[in-house]
């Protein structure tokens, strides 16, 4: 039995470039790091088939699940139907929330099964599988603090570990729109205006300059989300009023992240705000 911890991520600085790709999405560039929030996955080697279970009853346990899909794509790539695994996911990362839980799980399963099944496979084959799972998987294959470019498949490591920031993550009551919806409805005139923050935040991370990191947090999706979901702005204000030095929407939404320089302040905000919101999570950067 193999036990894994698959960590969530936060995008610290998201910029969309106002020239659509062939996929109709905008080119993107962002800085991303892992946070201390994780799913647990238990893997047991069996024969012939992939058996997936989860503590989250809303999580699909078929091809719609990236873990199930990753395992079967790996079997297909190496042309060996006799390979199998029994996999159980203990779900702690919120789904469809901008924290990359499914992609993190898929990347970890992929790398673990390569070892567990004693497979000989090259990076080109691994990246081929990753591309079929989703661009976010490319980041989780690399890990650390990275810049991500173009369509999400170009990933460059900046540094292994992020300076410590304490986080409070809050979900609004509104249902999350799809990432596709966000791309389709965002105004090209309003994006890519603050790309100078992209280079600044990378320099701040390398210097371990907390103030510089906080000053250059950015998300091009946020203005559209705030217009459609005014509750996001309320959450941001509540976080700042409870000691956060800044706040930022996670990915394409709708969770909001409060950033704190001190653990005690973050813990106090967490304890207070969990009385007002249904889903409030305490975490930190890794």
Image (cartoon, rainbow, N blue to C red):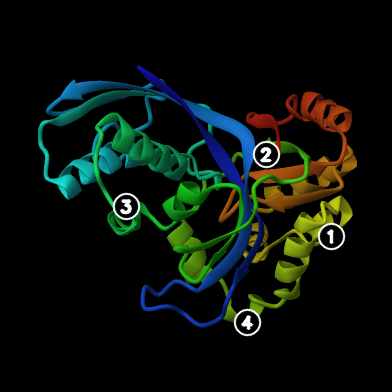
Of mark 2 and mark 1, the one earlier in the sequence is 1
> How far across and how far down the image is residue 204, in percent?
80, 59
Which mark is in front, 3 or 4? Answer: 3
- Per the image, the residue denoted by label 2 is 286
Q: Residues within 10 Å of mark 2 (few under 14, many from 20)?
A: many
How far is mark 3 from mark 4, CA to CA?
Answer: 37 Å
Which residue corresponds to mark 3?
Answer: 126
Q: Which of pointers 4 and 2 indicates the residue nearer the eye?
A: 2
Graded by Cα atoms within 10 Å as few (under 14), some (14 to 19) or many (20 or more), the crowding at tag 3 reads: some
x, y percent for residue 183: 49, 67
Task: Classify residue 226 as left or right of residue 262.
Answer: left
Q: Nearer the viewer, mark 1 or mark 3?
A: 3
Q: Mark 3 to mark 2: distance in Å? A: 25 Å
- For numbered disc 3, what is the local secondary structure? helix
Viewport quadrant of the N terminus: top left
| Residue 40 visible in the snapshot | yes
Residue at x 63% of width, y 30% of height:
279
Q: Quadrant of the C terminus?
A: top right
Tag 2 or tag 4, which sits nearer the N-term? 4
How far apart are labels 1 and 4 at the CA level? 23 Å
- Is 223 situated left or right of 215 in this image? left
Q: Helix, strand or loop at disc 2? A: loop
In front of the other: label 2 or label 1? 2
Which of the marked residues, 1 or 4, is nearer the chain's N terminus? 4
Nearest to N terminus: mark 1 or mark 3: 3
State yes or no: discs 1 and 3 in contact (Cβ < 8 Å): no
Q: CA distance from mark 4 to mark 2?
A: 34 Å
- Numbered tag placed on residue 189 in the rendering: 4
């Amino acid at each position: 039995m193999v036990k894994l911890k698959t960590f969530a991520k936060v995008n610290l600085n998201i910029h969309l470039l106002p020239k659509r790709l062939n996929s109709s999405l905008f080119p993107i560039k962002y800085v991303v790091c892992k946070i201390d929030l994780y799913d647990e996955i238990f893997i047991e080697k069996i024969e012939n088939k992939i058996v997936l279970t989860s503590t989250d009853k809303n999580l699909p346990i078929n091809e719609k699940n990236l873990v199930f899909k990753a395992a079967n794509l790996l079997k297909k790539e190496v042309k060996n139907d006799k390979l199998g695994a029994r996999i159980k996911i203990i779900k702690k990362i919120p789904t469809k929330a901008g924290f990359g839980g499914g992609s993190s799980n898929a990347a970890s399963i992929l790398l673990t099964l390569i070892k567990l099944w004693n497979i000989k496979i090259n990076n080109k084959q691994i990246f081929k599988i990753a591309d079929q799972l989703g661009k976010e998987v490319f980041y989780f294959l690399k890990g650390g603090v990275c810049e991500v470019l173009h369509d999400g498949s170009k990933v460059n490591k900046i540094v292994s570990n992020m300076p410590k920031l304490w986080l409070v993550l809050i979900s609004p009551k509104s249902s999350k729109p799809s990432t596709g919806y966000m791309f389709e409805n965002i105004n090209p005139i309003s994006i890519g205006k603050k790309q100078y923050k992209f280079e600044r935040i990378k320099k701040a991370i390398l210097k371990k300059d907390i103030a510089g990191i906080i000053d250059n947090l950015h998300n091009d999706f946020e203005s559209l989300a705030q217009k459609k979901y005014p509750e996001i702005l309320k959450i941001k204000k509540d976080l700042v009023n409870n000691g956060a030095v800044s706040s930022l929407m996670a990915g394409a939404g709708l969770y909001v992240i409060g950033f704190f320089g001190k653990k005690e302040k973050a813990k106090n905000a967490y304890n207070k705000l969990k009385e007002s919101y249904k889903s409030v999570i305490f975490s930190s950067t890794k």
